[in-house]
Image (cartoon, grey):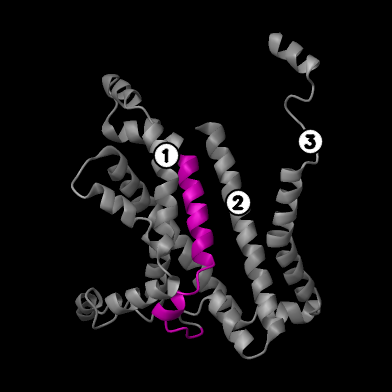
Amino acid sequence: MAVAQSRIRNPKSKFQIPKFSLPWGVTIGYLTIMLLLPVTALLLQASQVGIAEFWRIATSPMALSAYNVTFVTALVATVFNGGFGLLTAWVLVRYDFPLKRLVDAAIDLPFALPTAVAGLTLANVYSENGWIGSLLAPLGIKVAFSRFGVFVAMLFISLPFIVRALQPVLQEMEHDIEEAAWSLGATKFQTFWQVIFPPLFPALLTGIALGFSRAVGEYGSIVIVSSNIAFKDLIASVLIFQRLEQYDYAGATVIGTVLLGISLLILLVINLLQAWGKRYQ
């Protein structure tokens, strides 16, 4: 009753339209310049291509292969990192061990390392003569200059997003709820799945979404660690650059537009999953 009366007295307490002010205007202006105008320019450029020509370029065999390599590999890499990122965040939060701060700082290495340097490092390590590649070569496993190399590069650049999204939630989680579950007879697996994992699920999806977006847009490291051959390991961003080198601006614009649309659609689905996770956690 008191809540209802307070809402009657102040009907705008929940939904308020921000009044125009300098911070509000600066925010709108900055977002318009940095986000709205570039996207609008891309869409306008793509609209100059006829519908039939747009469809022909967007569904060409080379483009479809590039979409497959880009999105499928990025999705598999980020889901794979979801498990290992959760494990890494758990160890960093719950355990103390020598050089813990150094390991924790190393998680952010993909943020600070230039992408070209990352690609060169991965190519050297995973090539047939590299430290790890030389061990995998006798087994018939080729990493560098293959689609597997694209997968490894996406793993490398997406891991920090997942770990950093999970760490704050784990740090705020009380140990008492785990002890209460154990006292009621729950096993360690039941405690994790029914008590610990539900609050972590929205943060995990957030990290996967951020890592996926980063992996889809990666260029610098992948262009070095892969062979960039069509129908093999060519990703969409490299295909766009190749079209620009050939002065095929229409083809580059169409593929970029498709890439933007698919990315927004996938991010929308992930955001809906996040909302569902927060509702039922």
Q: Residue at x 32, y 27 (%)?
A: 175
Indicate whether 26 appears above or below 138. above
As measured in the structure, the alpha-carbon distance from the residue carrying label 2 to the one carrying label 3 is 27 Å
In the displayed orientation, state which residue is furthest to the bottom: 246
Q: Nearer the viewer, mark 2 or mark 1?
A: 1
As measured in the structure, the alpha-carbon distance from the residue carrying label 2 to the one carrying label 1 is 24 Å
Main SS category, magenta section: helix
Instruction: Depth check: give the residue in front, 174 or 10.
Output: 10
Give, as a three-letter code, the residue at label 1.
Pro
Q: Earlier in the sequence, mark 2 or mark 1?
A: 1
Task: Left or right? Give the position of 127 relative to 57.
Answer: left
Q: Residues within 10 Å of mark 3 (few under 14, many from 20)?
A: few
Q: Earlier in the sequence, mark 2 or mark 3?
A: 3
* Residue 157 x %, y %: 42, 63
* Residue 112 x %, y %: 41, 62
Give, as a three-letter code, the residue at label 3.
Ile
Report the residue marked by disc 1: 168
Q: Secondary structure at mark 2?
A: helix
Mark linked to residue 269: 2
As measured in the structure, the alpha-carbon distance from the residue carrying label 3 to the one carrying label 1 is 31 Å
Asked if residue 221 lies in the magenta stretch, the reply is yes
Report the residue marked by disc 3: 17
* Residue 258 x %, y %: 66, 70
Q: Which residues are magenta?
A: 201-230
